[in-house]
Amino acid sequence: MNDYRPLTILLVDDDEDDLLLAQRALDKSDLPHKAYSVHNGVELLEYLNRSGGYTEKTAPLPDLILLDLNMPKKNGIEALTEIRADAALRHIPIVLFTTSNSEQDILHCYQLGANSYIKKPVSFDALVEVMGSLKDYWVQYVILPPHRIASR
């Protein structure tokens, strides 16, 4: 069992409305969390590598990444591939959180090392329910890996 400390969640989505709804759903779900967000795979990798203006103070290493699939600059597949290739980052759990229901996308993401694949729900109430399930699983049951890098 986890110690119920706030989960540091990094939301990665190019749609500002989706980010806002996800944040509201997280808040409503009572999931103990600190959420940060970036808008594409390039920003995600800058955040994780603490480059491009991100620092250890402004970009705490996340316990969980909720990653959209279809984004400009660098999509979710490309970002997932790079993270899983980096020994210092590959331990971070990544949940694909996307509108795609394509069997090809689902299979590809799991082949690349995604921990889960969730289709974004249509209603806000369903989104709150999904965020609550994150609490049940990632906070109450999973023992998350310790962060191995202090700085990069």
Image: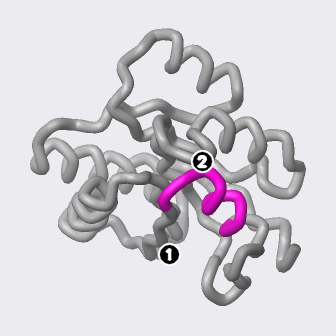
Q: CB under 8 Å between callouts 2 and 1?
A: no
Segment colored magenta: 39-47
Q: Nearer the observer, disc 2 or disc 1?
A: 2
- Which sits in the foreground, 109 or 150? 109
At x 72%, y 75%, the residue is 52
Please, is residue 98 above or below residue 62 in the view?
above
Name the quadrant containing residue 100. Answer: top left
Seen at 32% across and 46% down, the residue is 133
Q: Position of residue 72 (x, y in %)?
A: 52, 45
The residue lying furthest to the front in this view is 73
Number of numbered discs on residues: 2
In the rendering, at what x and y percent does residue 139 appear?
46, 58
Decide which of 51, 111 is in the foreground and name it: 51
Q: Is the magenta region chiefly helix, strand or loop?
A: helix
Q: Amino acid at mark 2?
A: Lys
**Residue 56, quarter of picture:** bottom right
In the image, taking residue 127 as reference, residue 40 lies left or right, namely right
Mark 1 residue type: Arg
> At 60% from the left edge and 26% from the top edge, which residue is drawn?
109
**Does the segment drawn in magenta span residue 45?**
yes
The percent position of residue 134, horizontal first and vertical second, equals 38, 50
For numbered disc 1, what is the local secondary structure? loop
Disc number for residue 92:
none
- Along the polypeptide, which appears first: circle 2 or circle 1? 1
| Badge number at residue 73 | 2
From this viewpoint, which residue is outermost toward the top?
103
Circle 1 residue? 5
Residue under the point 48% across and 59% down: 39
**Image quadrant occupied by the C terminus:** bottom right
Identify the secondary structure beneath mark 2. Answer: loop
Measured as percent of width and height from the top left, residue 103 is found at 46, 10
Determine which quarter of the picture holds residue 26: bottom left
